[in-house]
Amino acid sequence: MLSSCCETKARGCTFALMNDNFSPRTYPDFAGTVGRTFAGSKGSWADRKTPRGGAPNIVVMLADDLGFSDLGCYGSEISTPNLDALAARGMRMTNFHAAPMCSPTRASLLTGLSPHRAGFGSVAHFDPGFPGYAMELPPQVDTLAEQLRDRGYATLMVGKWHLCKDSDASAAGPQHSWPIQRGFDRFYGFLDAFTNLHQPHRLTQDNSTVEVDEYPEDYYLTDDLTTRSISMIRERKSSNPEQPFFLYFAHGAVHAPLHAKAEDIERYKDRYTEGWDSLREERFARQKALGIVPADTKLPARNSEPNHDVEAWDSLDEMQRELFAKHMAVYAGMVDNIDQNVGRLIAALEQLDELDNTIFIFTSDNGASREGEEVGTTSYYVHLMQGNDVEADHARLDLIGGPQTTPHYPRGWAMASNTPFRLYKINTHQGGHSVPFIVSWPDGLPSDGSMRDQWGHVSDLLPTLIDVVDGVAPTTQADGSALDGKSLLEVMRDPSAVSLHTEQAVEVNGHRGFYRDGWEAVTLHQSLTPFADESWELYDLTVDRTETNNLADVDPDRLAELKSAWEEAAWEQQIYPLDEGTSLKYLIRPERSSVYSLPVTIAAGTPTLERWRSVQLIWFRSCAIEIAVSLNSTDRGHLVAHGDQGGGYAIYVLDSHIWFCHNDGRG
């Protein structure tokens, strides 16, 4: 109790405690002491974790569907001077592997776990109710962003997330597997698999939808993502110059729809008239000259497996060649633009004097994609369901790459992009998961432009980067479970170091594979055929990286050993059940999903529904749209609109009439 024993003095009052012999106390879990006043108390502050002195900034840049040979420093004719320069002042890995599909790679990168253990045995487009296909990041493990934030890093992300269920990507969430909830301080990008690069159908900033009335005429997503990332970095460094940052930059490019800026397409308009066979030979020759592959490497024959085959370019007619060459010119323009924006980001880091102490990693989420199948498409969404029409596409030749089409190139170009390897994204053969990997850190790693041929995997990134920050590589996740990834830091520092990642199981869409100590057993699953009927192939990758000599009949004991190892790993890593090709996995949904097909009421002024949510209301069903509106003769504008140039519908008012418009995706 305070006594107001004021003495009237010129300098005011003095206060004293009545009980001078009071003993300070404390509170549970509080290390200080507490008296009745601040003067008689001693404070205590919780430690705020900070990285080790000199901890580097971290940039992990992930391209989407970029093939092994698509960069200049990996043998490409595409102009990538900034990435080539990054490799020249750092190093390239020539034996680095992603998962053969996008969501699995992203989950593995952020958790250090094999994809199925991270809940992503496939892309996040279904929820069949099994641990390996949970389609959300496990709550009991810490992401790379969460671990770095706990160590004092600012954690920033731009681009493609694709690590939450389709049904959770709407404004209503739930948001527990969104970027902000999984460790990122800031996020700007899109939550689902792909978007229109000229006019994105839906962008998210942090946890909120970005409301856009109209995109600028010259808008391009890759440019926007780069601008946002630079702004985030500058903002953080202005406020706290000593705090290192982690930037996860996940490109939408070069995933379909293949969209590029007109000036970038123009640069390659006549480059691909000689076709994919010629291009593949050119790239392979450059790879041998660069040392990307040994001089005695064999280039496999053109892909000829049923449903994966590629026609000889010379067998195509004139219309096909003209159309297909345009598709590849657009793709090249997309790659070129990624490189331009890498240059912008590097220039910003140089301006901030942060480049030398930034570990900058560039890689891809899988091999190049064959989703365009034999003839490609200008209508990606329609093509996935119904196939395509070459004559109709050729009639839209001048529109390819612009906002009015949603193109994808034919799989012959994917074969060339994956040079020198066989097959494509989704396959467990080398073309599905062999990806370029560049790392540069002038202050901490050799800057001699050297190469490493040791085996590495995307799950190695988390332990590698924590090793960089802590000085010791982690071996377990937050829940005590073992990490699958191993630190590559010693391999990066020492070209003679041995990779610690000696074996890896892989499975996507029924395709299976197992790697151990330079040997690989692999299958090519034919949809709707029994798994027991499949023939396993066996390759000694130490002398046959391109899988040209199947040793299954020569070394049956080794094949049996690797098959048994795959089976054991499949149960340990929750890979089962396998996808037999019936599409059943897309149809199995929890009962709660039925709510998404119930009628909805959209209040005036509300942003449009997210794509997956709006599709549930109309997909393979009759539907009624009821609108209550009061109009006068001068009113005009949209009442409801869902979709984009790739397909959708709108109801709008024009000339005193209400109109219904349906875009079937064919323009």
Image (spheres, rainbow, N blue to C red):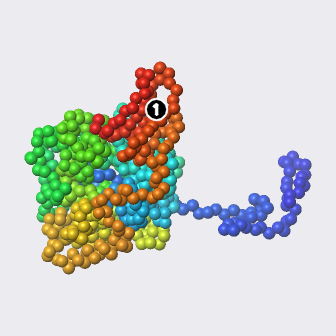
Task: Examine the rendering and report whether any part of residue 438 can be seen.
Answer: no
The furthest residue to the bottom = 557
Reply above or below: 185 against 257.
below
Rendered-image quadrant of the C terminus: top left
The furthest residue to the front = 622
- Is the residue marked by circle 1 packed among few (<14), some (14-19), or many (20+) residues within 10 Å? some
Q: Which residue is mark 1?
A: 639
Numbered label tally = 1
Residue 397's quadrant in the figure? top left
Left or right of 230? Residue 41 is: right
Residue 31's quadrant in the figure? bottom right
Residue 180's x, y, as percent? 49, 53
Of residue 359 and residue 420, the one placed in the foreground of this image is 420
Left or right of 437? Residue 293 is: left
Residue 564's x, y, as percent? 28, 76
Callout 1 secondary element: strand
Rendered-image quadrant of the N terminus: bottom right
Of residue 491 and residue 104, the one placed in the foreground of this image is 104
Reply above or below: 556 against 27.
below
The furthest residue to the top = 633
The furthest residue to the left = 314
Residue 4's x, y, as percent? 89, 54
Left or right of 425? Residue 204 is: right
Residue 19's x, y, as percent? 86, 65
Residue at 48% x, 35% y: name it: 626
Of residue 101 and residue 61, the one placed in the foreground of this image is 101
Residue at 43% x, 44% y: name it: 617
Task: Examine the rendering and report whether any part of residue 316 can be seen.
Answer: yes
Residue at 29% x, 50% y: name it: 83
Amino acid identity at mark 1: Leu
Residue at 42% x, 66% y: name it: 131
